[in-house]
Image: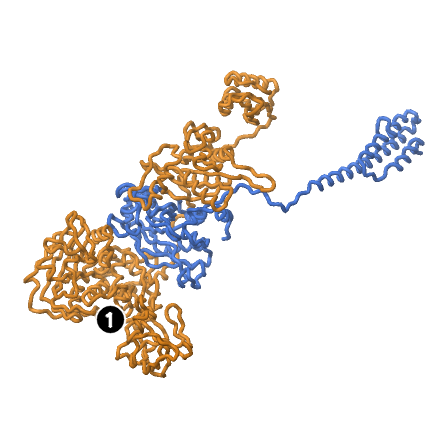
Chain colours: A blue, B orange
Amino acid sequence: MENKKVLEVKKELEKDLVEIDDLKVVNDLKVKYLGKKGLITELNSEIKNVPNEEKKEFGMQVNELRNTFNDYYEKMVEKLEKAELDKKLANEAIDVTLPATKLAVGAPHILEKVIEEVEEVFMSMGFDVIDGPEIEEDKYNFEMLNIPKGHPARDAQDTFYVEGEEMLLRSQTSPVQVRTMLKGEGKTPIRMICPGKTYRRDDDDASHSHQFMQIEGLLVDKDISLSDLKGTMDVLFKRLFGKSSETRFRPSYYQFTEPSVEVDITCVNCHGKGCNVCKHTGWVTVCGAGVVHPNVLRMSGYDPDVWSGFAFGFGAERLAMMKYDINDIRTFYNTDLREAKIFDREDEE
Amino acid sequence: MISLNWVKDYIDIADQDVHELATKITKAGINVEAVVSHEIPGLIIGQIKKIENHPDSETLHVCQVDIGKENLQIVCGAQNIYEGMKVVVAQEGTVLPGNVEIKKSKLRGVDSCGMMCALWELELEEKPEDIYASGIHDLDKNAPVGGDPLVYLGLDDTLYDLDIHKHRNNDCYYHIGFAYEIACILNRKVKLPELDFKTVKDKINDNFKLEVKTDKCSYYLAREVRNVKVGESPDFIKQRLVAAGMRPINNVVDISNYVMLEFGQPLHFFDKDKLGEKILVRDAKDGEKIVTLDGNECELNSSDIVITDGKNPVCIAGIKGGANTEVDENTKNILIESAIFDSVSIRNTSKRLELPSEAAIRYGKGLSYEYTEMANRRACHLLEKYAGAEVLDGYVLVDNEDYSEKTLTFKPEDVDKILGITISEEDMKTELERLDFPYTVKNHEFKVTIPRRRLDIDANVNDIAEEIGRLYGYNNLASSVPSVPLRRGEYIGDVKYRKLVSKRLRSLGLTEVKTYTLVSPEMASKFKYEEKEQVVLPNPMSVDKSVVRTTLIPSLLNIYEYNKARGVKDISIYEIAKTYDKKYEEVSKVCGLMSGEYLTNSWNGNMKIDFYVVKGVVEDILEYMGYHDRYSFRRDNCSDLHPGVQASIILDGKKIGILGKVHPNISKKDIYVFELNLNSIFGRTNKLKYKEAFKYPSIEKDMAFILDKNIDVYEVIKTIKKGANKILQEVGVFDVYEGERVDQNKKSVAFNLVFNGMDRTLTDEEVMKVFNGLIDKVVTTYKAELRDK
């Protein structure tokens, strides 16, 4: 049997507990039922008037009422708070299509990007990356490379002398190879590349620069052949210009290599079909190379009867110009930041 | 330029396609840059049968021209035509040089079917200034009507434009040498030209003396010819000289040039009557003067070689003849010199006197004696044949040449080892035969003699391997990988650190640039904050690039200006480069320049670059490289920076760089720069170690003081840190105020202190005790006034 008072409150509840859109009204209801003088709160004080055997039953009934109200209250509050938050969030909506904030991120220099690619290929093959002075002694830049004073090969590399005929701005990075060999004392095998600045007395124009970046490399070990050079060049240029890129050797001449070759690769522009860039040959020259001249080995303390090796060198500018279709070498030394920015990204293999 | 018609005199190449041959030659190492042909299909020899005046023109004529198979009516404006004249006719459809196509047309109402040509219109002659005066080309009477005019003129030639590597330009820049190169590619033999001549009874030795008093002339040979008749050269000589880019002058001069282009040996002809009875070759005297063929006076010095008549110079040896012994139209008797001079001396003299004559270029490259004597005989032969010369008996000669033979012994496997492939003994023999290198084989060992014409080849296996390899074909090389131990390469030494700094700066928003090491004196005079003495080039190319820079700041300012001028607004750049001072001390530097906005959002607010952004970049680099708590910044006084907005960067008590705003005298814009000596931040840090973050709660306290304006906050922080015990973890600054609310020479600075006990929770009391102590310390040390607690 339900207590009469309980029944009254229950009826009142049934009347009151409807969907409400106002949090204040809901809270008022809470005061009405659960406040200090709330209807349910007051039922609690009725318990003393209830006969003992009904006390338990009464208590359960009051509790049920309390639970009913609480369930209702929680549901309403949750609903209304959500509605309020939704409304607030709706007001906070922004135009996601407005321009983003430009973060501070810099780009590598184009030449540096190309050099790092080359370094990566060679480091994977065990070549160290070594560096040397840009103001060099004549003996390292020329004499120990089999280019004695008065040799015509010196004319082609018209050199900036810094003091007399002894100190100069290096005209090639080969002196780093000489220095590395001297350090090896004729005992240590060598695998190194040396990218770096070089200087020649050229007037600056679209295809000449008095300062440019060379990447030279040297391998000295036992039983090294021209075919090994071919294999190494194949690996490099396939990595730089794609797997379909072929290399070919043409006889050439350098004072510090014998045999000497020029390395041609499939024309980057026409992929070998023939175009103006490759003068319709399908090939472009990218690199000078050869088997290290026995005199050079000997001068640097390596016995040519025991040791052999190959050396190669190319210009970073030329490589970058071919790879990225740049036609003025001065681009590299007068950087327009809008152009530089293009190179701040990964490239396809 | 090499003429193939000429080469055909020495080797049979009639069966070769000129383009395929060019490819073969290129593959074997001599680069044929261009194949130039004078073929013009559609040209035909015609004869003018009838000339009538044009009905509507005073200058034009209507000609009936017989070209064998038919008669053509051609309207022509040239004034030198006559009936019976043999002419070069370009038929309808012919494309003349310059892409001019001949079409049937009407000239003032009269049909014209073709064109009669002048040689310049075929690009066989320089365009004359008055093209009408010269008229159309008059072929001689014997020209066959209906024939090919270029064949008749001997101009149906193909030329190879060669790009020859230095080592081969002494044997491949003349026709016989090039014939040898073709011979070894095609495996054919070279036939040398005729050299014989008759001699008269008189002997040159009877009335002529030769003396050589310098070690820079290893060979000097002279013959004398008499009674030459100076006149025009035969057509083939003229044509070949033109093809090689030389202007025909007269038979005598032309023959001297012809022989040079044939054998590579420069000759010099003296007018014997002007010369006298003696030749003395000696070093020139300092200040000695000679007037050369072109009428210029040259001053010589003791490093030059000079030919004299015993007293006075008559020729700068190997470079240019003297006016005093010049061969002219009245010359009767000639002394023919063929000699070998020191190549270095010739090169230097020709460079200094700015006389890069054909002879000087050839001497400069080095000459072998192989053809020196032959060339002299060849000149006598040609002078006898084409100038009616009589050759005197005998010759005068001084010969100090080294005739020792260059020989080499090697085994086939020596060559294989260098090339990395196996070539059979038989194939090696074939290649040596193609090269025309004499050899013998005994017990699988080759002994090869290297001919003198190949000065480039030394007696070592590598040189022979190259010759055999290039003929065998580099396309037959293997593509092998060096058999060396596997390892990964490394960045050695400084390279590694430069890469680290470079990458970090990019991630901080700076873009890498590269600029020139050589700068102008004006640039070099700026930002000399280190007072370094600079290297000035003794012979710069231009003043612009005459000083080796010791700082990169001016170069970056140029890049700034370049970008600014092109409308780029926000500029944050850096460069890492080496610098050198007068003692060649090398310092790697990193320089940054920042201006404009650091973060940009044009509609939502930017973050402008100021001193403290740039300072943040510098600090980040130092932190990144591992120098936490080891650096500081002090006021500095570089005159090219804003006097109040600059600091030196101190690491471990030593100045390692500078940072500041560019002085308004240099730029009115807000530009900030920094430069760091990288050598001093490479590899001097400790290994990276784990450090636990605070586990227990920190207590933060603020204090604010009114300080004298000139007190550096850094000093106050140092005082606070020094006065605290180890529970003080951090001292920050959260407010700096100068203005109305404080005295003019004061500033208010608020500090934030973070306390943490590390291994325990601190009590408020112990913190307050330390905190109050620090306040007292600051107040007494700096006569500061406490503002807030």
Residue B667: image location, x then y, percent: 45, 37
User: Residue A274's x, y, as percent?
Assistant: 42, 63
Left/right placement of residue B347 relative to residue B688 reads left
Q: Nearer the viewer, residue A245 or B286?
A: B286
Percent position (x, y) of residue B193?
20, 69
Residue B490, by quadrant, is top left
Badge 1 density bin: few <14, some 14–19, many ≥20, Cα 10 Å:
few
- Chain hosting mark 1: B
**Does B562 sit above or below residue B641?**
below
Report which residue position mark 1 lands on: B236
Q: Report the front residue among A226 and B142.
A: B142
Tell me where residue B776 appears, x and y as whole percent. 54, 16
Query: Outermost residue toward the left?
Result: B206
- Looking at numbered disc 1 in the image, what kind of residue is underneath it? Phe
The picture quadrant where one finds residue B206 is bottom left
- Viewport quadrant of the N terminus of chain B: bottom left
- Is A4 on the left or on the right of B712, as rendered? right
The kind of secondary structure element at disc 1 is helix
From the image, which quarter does the C terminus of chain B lie in? Answer: top right
Q: Which residue is more in the foreground, B138 or B240? A: B138
